[in-house]
Image: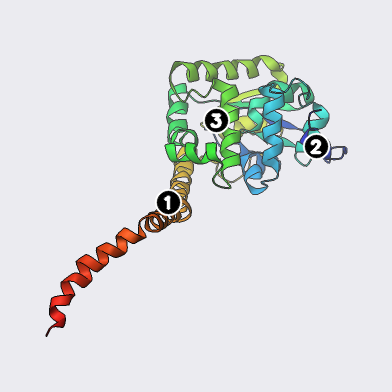
Amino acid sequence: MSKPRLIDAIPTAPRKVPMRVLALGLPNTGQISLALRKLGYDPFSMPRVLSTPSLIPLCQEAVDLTLLHKSPTKPPYTRSDFDKLLGDHDAVAQLPTCMFARELVDAYPDAQVILTTVPYDEWERGMRDGIWCLLTWRLFVVFRVLGLSKTAPLMRLVHALFAFHNGNAYGGAEAQVAYRKHNDMVRDLVPVDRFLEMGPEDGWEKLCAFLGKEVPKAEFPRVDEAKGMRAGLERTWWAMLRYMVEMILLPGVVCVLTLLWWWGQDEAWAWVDREVFGRLRPLAKF
């Protein structure tokens, strides 16, 4: 008998707020999450996952069962399951939820849908400089496969999300096809009166007109996602390298030297006696 799903251990409860907005654009297509927050929404997005590590296993399960269909005995996530995961939020934005575009549109048919897009070349460049580093830098790969740090579950989640999205193709024709396929799918999922496609250059006017919100006085958020993420990934890389040296390499060297000494201590003492004390004996005559 297979183990029960993790999500089934969470009691069923009615949503605290209705789901109002599904921002289903891929990462690195604009800071829609920040914009929605400034308009009073509370989107579920990657920062929420990062701040609540207990959500990572649930998101991983959702990917495995709903997108990758890894289990023939455990059903995929449905509306009630997504409510347990997202019930405190009235919006979703970018990773990990953007990969569940079809499922979320089916689950929340009254929500307004936003697709953020940028030209593909710009998107790939940003992904290569940002989040894809987490999946391509060799030190990160080692830590993900061996589970050597607290970051490993997050890296496995992101790896699984892009396994679904583009077969873990980090650039090139496969990634381009997957990018366009995702955007075309979202465009086809909802009627035009519930759908908005926008780019980072569109700003508040287009977004607020669609959502029926007053245009804020604050400037529309235009943060370089790749640059900010790259800086964080570089810090994480150095921290992992230090961890590997301090916790794995140095203890390993000490263990090897200890074993070599234990196996060859007779020869070692003979060498010390011959090379050190042997050279001192002539001096003892004086």
- Looking at the rendered structure, the kind of residue marked 2 is Lys
Decide: few, some or many residues near mark 1? Use Cα within 10 Å; few <14, some 14-19, many ≥20.
few
Q: Residues within 10 Å of mark 3 (few under 14, many from 20)?
A: few
Residue at the disc numbered 3: 202
Closer to the camera, 121 or 236? Answer: 236
Q: Is residue 245 left or right of residue 79?
A: left
Mark closer to the observer (1, 2): 1
Q: CA distance from mark 1 to mark 2?
A: 43 Å
Please say if 255 is above or below 201.
below
The image position of residue 80, as x and y in percent, is 83, 30
Q: Secondary structure at mark 2?
A: helix
Return the x and y of residue 109 as percentages of the image width and height. 78, 23
How far is mark 3 from mark 2, CA to CA?
Answer: 34 Å
Question: Residue at position x 58%, y 46% from top?
Answer: 218
Q: Number of labelled discs?
A: 3
Q: For this rendering, which residue is in front, 141 or 83?
A: 141
Under tag 3, what secondary structure?
Answer: loop
Question: Of the residues under marks 1 and 2, which one precedes in the sequence?
Answer: 2
In the figure, residue 105 lies in which quadrant? top right
Residue placed at 66% from the left, 31% from the top? 97
- Label of residue 84 in the image: 2
State which quarter of the image contains the C terminus.
Answer: bottom left
Question: Dot 1 lies on which element?
Answer: helix
Closer to viewer: mark 1 or mark 3 = 1
Q: Amino acid at mark 3?
A: Asp
In the visual, does 31 lie left or right of 137?
A: right
Question: Considering the image in quadrants, where does the N terminus appear?
Answer: top right
